[in-house]
Amino acid sequence: MTARCIMVLGTTSGAGKSWLTTALCRYYARQGFKVAPFKAQNMSNNARVVASENGEGEIGSAQYFQALAAQAVPDVRMNPVLLKPEGDTRSQVVLMGQVSDALSNMPWRERSQHVWPTIVQALEALRAENDVVVIEGAGSPAEINLSSSDIVNMRVALHCGAACLLVTDIDRGGAFAHLYGTWALLLPRERALIKGFVLNRFRGDARLLAPAPHMLQDLTGVPTVATLPMWWRHGLPEEDGVFDDRSLSTGQVTRRVAVVVYPRISNLDEFQPLKNIPGVRLQWVRSPVELAALQNDDWIILPGSKHTSSDLAWLRAQGLDAAIAHHAQQGAPVLGICGGLQMLGEALIDPHGVDGNAPGLGLLPLVTVFAHDKTVRHTRTRFAVDMADSAVPKATSSPSPWAAMAGVAVSGYEIHHGQTQEHAGMAAAGQTAHVCLPDGLGWCNAQGNVMGLYLHGVFEDSAALQALFGSTLTSPVPTLETVFEGLADFVETHFEAGVLQSLLQ
């Protein structure tokens, strides 16, 4: 078995490569093919824990969801190189699911010769096991300053003879220039692999596009094979950036969930299910003014961070620390996840130069020490049955929502260098944190309104959603399966007849 490869390229980042790749994974899977996704190198702080030869490792969240759409078991071969930005000029390199210090410290252009053999090995292993491999490119294939060290776009396409689609975001404007310019900058042998142009996020009457698609085909020989309408609520978590605020849940808003968006935010895709809860308004905040508008029933969430100390410094520079502390002092709910948990404590201690030393927000009597080795694993655990005993809010506040989690079993995943424990001096003085998850996974304050967890994915767990929102869930929350099926239906409807089948020939 040697799989046929189909590749989705984009004229720019954010053109729609990830979701289109996901849609094609499900489309071909339901045609009866054995399908796997692949992206040679991804740059994202949104990662998931998957199977690897060493037990468990990391891949980009986009490839994780693509694997589920393909009805395949996610594994590290689907994203052999993951770059996790820690600053504007540095990234942690994850190779086949494991952090590589050597590659992380290597100049950018020197990495390609070291990782290309691993990329080829991973791709060929997937081709040997599947009928179809749907490959996602990165950025633009026409970034000619990087072509000599390319390991993710046309070098991959040429290696496997992929049938390539080139997608552009027409909503941004300049789509035909983007398509033609990208095609023109490719080498002749690379142009030969481009089988179709895709216009994404189109609003209006598609008939008004004429005669541009035909003119473009006359210039390039490449047909425009799909015009995809704007679709705000397809339900797939975004890979990069925050979700579009125009995509709202149904019903009257009774609770706002404010997620603080610091520069190195990670794993933001885990909040996608909150958009589907009736009455919940998911809000992305960057200023104290936005937090000041919250009511006592509203939540503040400090999400994961790829560089906790620098994001904590940014948070203080914006004045968000005082706004978060004020919300907590009112007895209102504050939740920290992974890096957010670390921020809620008293101090960050970094003996190995992993993240940085910093004072915490002081909302939980905890101390985090960064270990050299990263914890990467799936976890199933249970919230403490006595959580409700600690969740006694101040008389001026509303009851803590976290008390509803008492005794609930949940599944999730961990990705963290930090190891957190109670502050010994504060504990000796009687200021202790209440354990809400065992094995150092979660704590609450004495009032019960501030909680910190190392467990990602709580809002993707149906038992947790039922505990937190059961009284408002009048219908089941949409599942990933319904999202994947909807994506496949969408491309089947809007691609020209026969095109998707022809890509396999």
Image: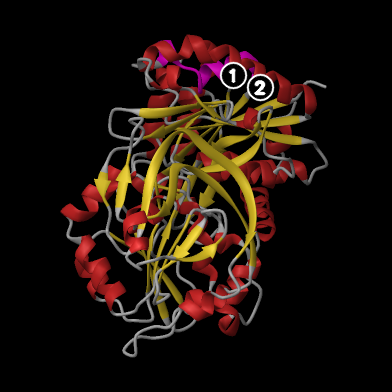
Q: Where is the C terminus found, in terms of image quarters?
A: top right
Question: Label 1 belongs to which residue?
Answer: 119
Q: Magenta stretch? A: 147-161
Can residue 250 be seen by looking at this rendering? no
Q: Are marks 1 and 2 in contact (CB under 8 Å)?
A: yes
The front one of 413 and 208 is 413
Q: What is the three-letter code of the residue carrying label 2? A: Leu
Quadrant location of residue 175? top left
In percent of the image, x 41 and y 22: which residue is there?
A: 104
Q: Where is the N terminus found, in terms of image quarters?
A: top right
Which residue is most to the bottom? 395
Q: Magenta-highlighted stretch: main secondary structure? A: helix
Q: Is residue 322 left or right of residue 496?
A: left
The front one of 427 and 310 is 427
Q: What is the three-letter code of the residue carrying label 1? A: Ile
Where residue 62 sits in the image (x, y, percent)? Answer: 55, 42
Q: Is residue 179 magenta?
A: no
Where residue 387 sits in the image (x, y, percent)? Answer: 53, 74
Question: Label 2 belongs to which residue?
Answer: 123
SS at mark 1 in the image: helix
Q: Is residue 1 left or right of residue 241?
A: right
Q: Is residue 491 left or right of residue 391?
A: right
Disc 1 versus disc 2: distance between alpha carbons? 6 Å
Quadrant location of residue 294? bottom left
The front one of 424 and 371 is 424
Image vertical order of residue 132 relative to residue 404, above or below: above
Where residue 157 sits in the image (x, y, percent)? Answer: 58, 20
Query: Label 1: how many residues lie within 10 Å, few (<14), some (14-19) or many (20+)?
Result: many
